[in-house]
Image (spheres, grey):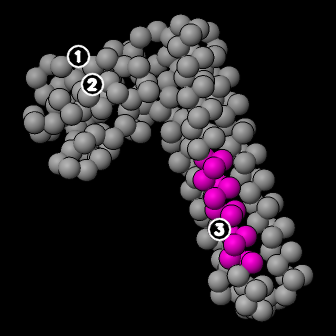
Amino acid sequence: MSDVTDFDEDDLKRRMSGAFESLKKELSGLRSGRASTALLEPIKVDAYGSLTPISQVGTISVPEPRMISVQIWDKTMVAAVDKAIRNSPLGLNPVMDGQMLRIPIPPLNEERRAEIAKLAGTYSENARVAVRNVRRDGMDGLKRLEKDSVISEDEHKSFASDVQKMTDDTIKRIDDILKAKQEEIMQV
């Protein structure tokens, strides 16, 4: 095979793995009835003119199994953090106590479990789209290389097959983790 400068298979693997790891992190934040600091990780707060992860404006802790608390460092940010949590798709209602937000975790009813499982599906579809975008970038790079006569048609087909296999494997991993998370959410 020739020296391929415009096609980096390791970069494609890294980007696909990044989409998968991002999904794992988002799914860990979806609750299955217990309080967890990971629940608030995907939430971004409008802080000082930019969207900032909630963990960068306060300390998140779990003082009891059905309660999350957020100790906000800057008292001017309390309202913004409260708003960000309320507007998130998690359906949580924080209670303000000075610079502390207490977030009770209500028990999940069947309807709420279905909503959370649907949200998990949305997160996984976003990850699939990200993986397919990485695949498209790889395929476009291969087409350019073949057009510029850097690789042959046979090399293009071989590399394209490798990219498709990587994509299929990553999508399967996404589907597997989604199925496991949905089963965990729907358990009574």
Residue 74 colored magenta?
A: no
Q: From the viewer's perspective, is 52 left or right of 48?
A: right
Q: Look at discs 3 and 2 and give the one toward the viewer.
A: 3
Give the percent coordinates (x, y) of residue 118: 60, 25
User: Mostly what secondary structure, the magenta segment?
Assistant: helix
Q: Say above or below: 47 vs 88.
A: below
Callout 2 secondary element: strand
Q: Look at discs 1 and 3 and give the one toward the viewer.
A: 3
Report which quarter residue 181 is drawn in: top right
Q: CA distance from mark 1 to mark 3?
A: 46 Å
| Marks 1 and 3 in Cβ contact (< 8 Å) | no
Of mark 1 and mark 3, the one earlier in the sequence is 1
Q: CA distance from mark 2 to mark 1?
A: 9 Å
Q: Find residue 95 and name its label.
A: 1
Which amino acid is tagged 2?
Ser
User: Badge 3 is on which residue?
Assistant: 137
Q: Residues within 10 Å of mark 1 (few under 14, many from 20)?
A: few
Q: Find residue 69 and name its label.
A: 2
Report which quarter residue 70 is drawn in: top left
